[in-house]
Image (cartoon, rainbow, N blue to C red):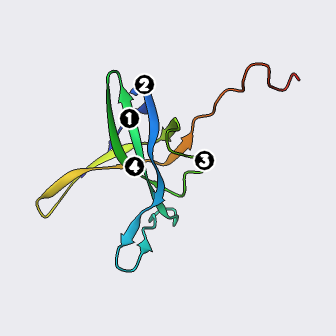
Amino acid sequence: MASLPIDTAKFTGIICAVPPAPRIANRETGQLRVDRDTGKTVYQVGLCLMSGASADVVTVNVPGEPSGVQLGMPVAVRDLVATPWENDGRHGVAFRAAEIRPLSTPAPAGKGAAQ
């Protein structure tokens, strides 16, 4: 099925709800899932996507460890896509992003290069 791009600029906020963890490919052996294109380990991150008065938590796969992303932290997501899937009567939507990174925070007042 086709991947559907998601415009993250439409969300009022995106927060890390579940910290990054490597995705397991084989539970019996503990083998980690590896991205076909980059060769990096795939990580899963639970993101709270907020829009107006509603919010949804989705699990997003991303190649490579999202450095600095922690629980409760606002994040930026690059190239988020949703891919509908169906397998043996089960169905759902898989989310994937090219990158998840912490939002930069402005320096506190009175701190900066001028001092």
Mark 2: give few (<14), some (14-19) or many (20+) Cα within 10 Å.
few
Report the front residue among 67 and 62. Answer: 67
Query: SS class of the residue under badge 4?
Result: strand
Q: Residue at x 41, y 75 (%)?
A: 30
Mark 3 sits on what residue?
A: 68
Mark 4 sits on what residue?
A: 60
Mark 2 sits on what residue?
A: 12
Q: Residue at x 39, y 38 (%)?
A: 48
Residue 3 visible within the image: no
Expressed as whole percent of the image width and height from the top left, the position of residue 74 reads 52, 35
Residue 77 visible within the image: yes
Name the N-terminal-most of marks 1 and 2. 2
Q: Examine the rendered structure and indicate whether residue 105 appears above or below residue 92.
A: above
Name the N-terminal-most of marks 2 and 3. 2
Q: Which mark is residue 49?
A: 1
In the image, what residue type sits under mark 3?
Gly
In the image, what residue type sits under mark 2?
Thr
Name the N-terminal-most of marks 4 and 2. 2
In the image, what residue type sits under mark 4?
Val
Distance in Å between CA atoms under marks 1 and 2: 8 Å
Distance in Å between CA atoms under marks 2 and 3: 21 Å
Query: SS class of the residue under badge 3?
Result: loop
Quadrant of residue 54 in the image? top left
